[in-house]
Image: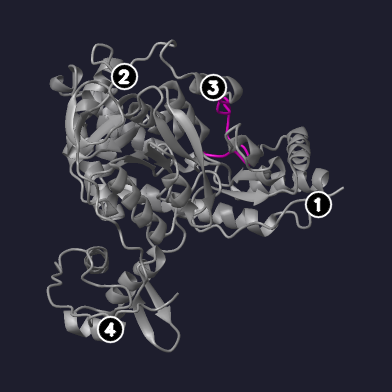
Amino acid sequence: MPESTTPAMPFNPAGIELDRRQGLSLQLFQALRLRVLDGRLGSGTRLPASRDLAAALGISRNSVVRAYDQLYAEGYIEGRVGDGTYVAQLPQTQPAAKKLSTKLSTGFSTGLPTALSTKSPNTPGILSSKVIHSSALQTLEHNHLPTPPSGPPRAFRVGVPAFDLFPFDVWAKLNAAFWRKPALQQLCYGDPAGDERLRGLIAAYLRSSRGMQCSAEQIVITSGAQQAISLCAQLLVEPGAVVGIENPGYRAAGHAFAVAGARLHGVPVDEEGIDCAALANLSDCRLAYVTPSHQYPTGVVMSLARRLELLAWAERNQGWIIEDDYDGEYRYSGAPLAPLAALDREGRVLYVGTFGKVAFPALRLGYLVLPAGLVQAFARRRAVDVRHSEVSTQAVMAEFMAAGHFQRHIRRMRRAALSRRNCLLAHWPKDVDGVGSLPAVAAGLHLTVSVSSLVRERELIAKAQSVGVEVNGLSNYWLPDSHTPADQRAGLVLGFAAVPEADIQVALARLRSVWCK
């Protein structure tokens, strides 16, 4: 990476104040990251050696090393062989355009800038088939949304965590305790934004695990991540609006936007994430849907430079970014990466989270972290559909988190997913005709491997089905009007967390028997 042409000021640790009652490495990481983002630590600034910084701050060297490791992982700093540690070269963001006031599709004024939605307040967020844009109808007709597989989990189902390890006994006790003597106010109509205690615990969890400076007041509880995405589509999209989505990508998100009347434009994904240059070339596009922590389905982790570029795009265009952090808890080296929402200084990011990838899909519990000015509109729009979330699930999850079970379970699930990933990598059949080598997997619950052609992809999937093994084709994740040649869309998407290691080995033996003949 080239050095800065302008000599950077030397690093001065003055002003870094750490609370010794809290995690020192996390505080130091956040302090240094903030200084990089706001320009106090410019590109090319040489950082002190970990031992020297530890001495200057009066903390252990291990705390500094952990902070540096996370900064390395997220792309804020880089090492130069024999020459120390420097702030990485990061893109310079452009100033945002003048803000304009507008409304969401519900007709509720947000006071925030966008130019997306002007639907009538008389029918808040509800579209008849007559007003859905014709291109959206065409997309729906030619790109049918597959029904998620039902029945017990098996290898290699995508999107399913190791919920065989969920502490159902603990959950049952907490659930029984709730219903044994529920508070009367909890049995009345609740806040459409969700249980206040649960929202507070989610905010505290995101502050500690993701570095997001959010509060309970910014959170709206939803019935899973899909409802959160659908709410975004209902309130931020008007018929004919352009929405940029990753291609290949999460098709159910695309369907939600299409139902709202959007004109979907697939944006290519490369080794750093969504192609921001291609996104910027979409005229009148002010909404982008992304999965930066672990791109679905390619598995790419969006680079820091690309994250900053995407945020700059939203600021320039007065647009929105919907960030789906569907499996961000699963990172196998270092802490989970800071989401876009943690880097957002202009209130442009709507963050989608879910408990389904940590607990179990049938829980149907997710949430949105919203810019403060959007919360009321989203809560009121949700009240139109379901009034409020189911009471006991929220209350039990709140107690599950407050008692420390949630954090312990995340650690257990991460270890299990890592072990099951390693089993897949170790026993994968070698030299299968037309199948590329398995990629390194640093995050998430699935991996994607390339296949030489679409014909070969379909052949491999059919043979896998013949021996009871579930394999997904990468070609199914592309928009139907993609310009990428068909054979370049071919691949296999394999979830590795749904079943134990013994079942993975049995499934791989079956694949070997039909793939390697």
Task: Please report whichever mark, 3 or 2, sits nearer to the chain's N-terminal start.
Answer: 2
- Depth order, front residue of 15/326: 15
Q: Are marks 3 and 4 in contact (CB under 8 Å)?
A: no
Above or below, 161 relative to 126 = below
The quadrant holding residue 226 is: top left
Q: Is label 4 or label 2 in front?
A: 2
Q: CA distance from mark 2 to mark 1?
A: 50 Å
* 404 vs 364: above or below: below
**Is any atom of residue 249 visible in this view?**
yes
Tell me which residue sits at (37%, 70%) in the image: 89
Instruction: Please name the residue that numbered disc 4 is placed on.
Output: 48
Q: Quadrant location of the N terminus?
A: bottom left
In the rendered structure, which amino acid carries the disc numbered 2?
Answer: Gly
Residue density around tag 2, few if under 14, some if 14–19, many if 20 or more, within 10 Å:
many
Q: Residue at x 33, y 27 (%)?
A: 231
Q: Which residue is mark 2?
A: 125
Disc on res. 433: 1
Q: Which residues are magenta?
A: 145-160
Would residue 294 be seen by someone viewing this image from the given angle? Answer: no
Left or right of 375 in this view: 441: right
- Indicate the position of residue 52 as horizontal and vertical percent values: 25, 86
Residue 150: x and y, percent? 57, 26
